[in-house]
Image (spheres, grey):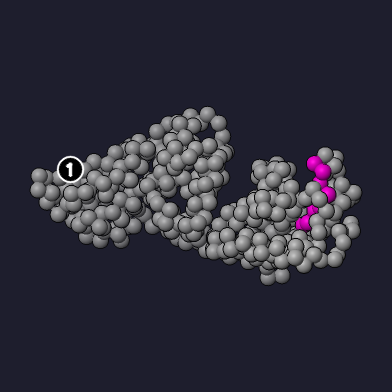
Amino acid sequence: MTRLASQDLDVARLLFDLKRCGELVNRFTGWLQADAIAACVTDELVETFGCAFARLWLVEADRSALRLMASSGLYTRLDGSFARVPMGSFKVGKIAQHCIPFLSNCLADEVWVKDRSWAIEQRIQGFAGLPLMAQGQAIGVLAVFSHEPMGPEFLEVLQMLSLSVTGALASAVNHQAALSSREKAADSTTLSEQLGNLLGRQKLSLLGTEQALPPALTQLLLKLGHQLTQLSCQYCRLVYEADAVILEAMLVDARSDLTDQLQEITHSAQLSGGTLQMQSDANQAIAQVRLQLPLQPPAFAPTRPSPLSEREREVLQLLVAGYRDRDIAQQLYISDRTVKFHVKNVLTKLQVKTRIQAVYAVAQAGWLDGPGIPDSG
């Protein structure tokens, strides 16, 4: 290992950096999305601590390789030759395999560096690669590059930060594994069964052969189901036709603000190529609600690959379906703060200012596949 900067600690500098480290940790504490945690960490290492480049990989479930989760600074793309690093390959893979931190302040002189000219051209001197250890094995690797030699104070901060990051990522990974198990179990429950549990099985009738629907379509129908439980629903019918799925309901003592109450669902239905119709008698005593959604969403031809990540597409998909931040957080088992983090990234990537503009932008670009977002990009 190449010699580091002088080991005499600047106590004032250390305390200042530890304070900033604590503020960073507080930002992602409680988050349950590994990609959001990783992005928060690498972004702050660049923006707050002045690093030139920071990356974070997570070890895949079968422990055969590491997958790049976040990249900030000189490179922000998550594809390329280091998007997936086999365990034991390159310096990152070796750090994960042997669980030994590696620190250097003369990166261009290291024999293992794949492209020394890159380090020289980018004026990279400092490098720190730290295994993120949980239960005796690495669950990931944090790599940090700097233009200046890394002082001992900063290396102490990195060690402290890696402990907090490891705990947060381990919780997020475990939570995601549990969520996947619950989702698999939920997949076996049909839409009619879910609506029956909401409304009462005696109030629901099924007409036609039930079939699997896109998740966003199911979510929109269930959202209407939740609304119907608050609107004195006396009867509901789920109809599967050749090219559409329909949810009809009969309400008594219909509210005068029924249109406002269902405005979000109306908007979401229109975006998906469907309609939400409401009719009531003169006395508002009885009202009929009819949501019709096409089984084949409107065809849009994508003009370019989507810049959005899988999680950002999921968040935007729920926004299109009319969900609010709190509801999205519950649907995806993440915090409200994580939802806002993803929405902010979506607005930045799409270069828009509002959520409505974001929905319009993806629809115009052809990334809005009915009520959902295609897996392009």
Q: Residue at x 86, y 65 (%)?
A: 7
Residue 17 is situated, as x and y percent measured from the top left of the image, at 71, 62
Q: Is residue 5 left or right of residue 364?
A: right
Residue 106 is situated, as x and y percent measured from the top left of the image, at 87, 51
Q: Residue furthest left?
A: 283
Q: Quadrant of residue 63?
A: bottom right
Q: Which residues are magenta?
A: 122-129
Residue 5 among those drawn in magenta: no
Residue 69 appears in the picture as rendered:
no
Residue 293 is situated, as x and y percent measured from the top left of the image, at 33, 40
Residue 209 appears in the picture as rendered:
yes
Residue 128 among those drawn in magenta: yes
**Label 1, on which residue?**
279
Q: Is residue 14 left or right of residue 236?
A: right
Quadrant that contains the C terminus: top right
Q: Residue furthest front?
A: 12
Residue 158 is situated, as x and y percent measured from the top left of the image, at 73, 61
Q: Nearer the viewer, residue 84 or 107?
A: 107
Q: Nearer the viewer, residue 116 or 184?
A: 116
Indicate the secondary structure of the residue bearing disc 1. strand
Q: Residue at x 47, y 35 (%)?
A: 361
Q: Check disc 1: other Cα within 10 Å, few if <14, some if 14-19, many if 20+.
A: some
Quadrant that contains the N terminus: bottom right
Q: Residue at x 81, y 59 (%)?
A: 151
User: Disc 1 marks which amino acid?
Assistant: Gln
Q: Quadrant of residue 15?
A: bottom right
Q: Quadrant of residue 94?
A: bottom right
Q: Residue at x 40, y 33 (%)?
A: 298
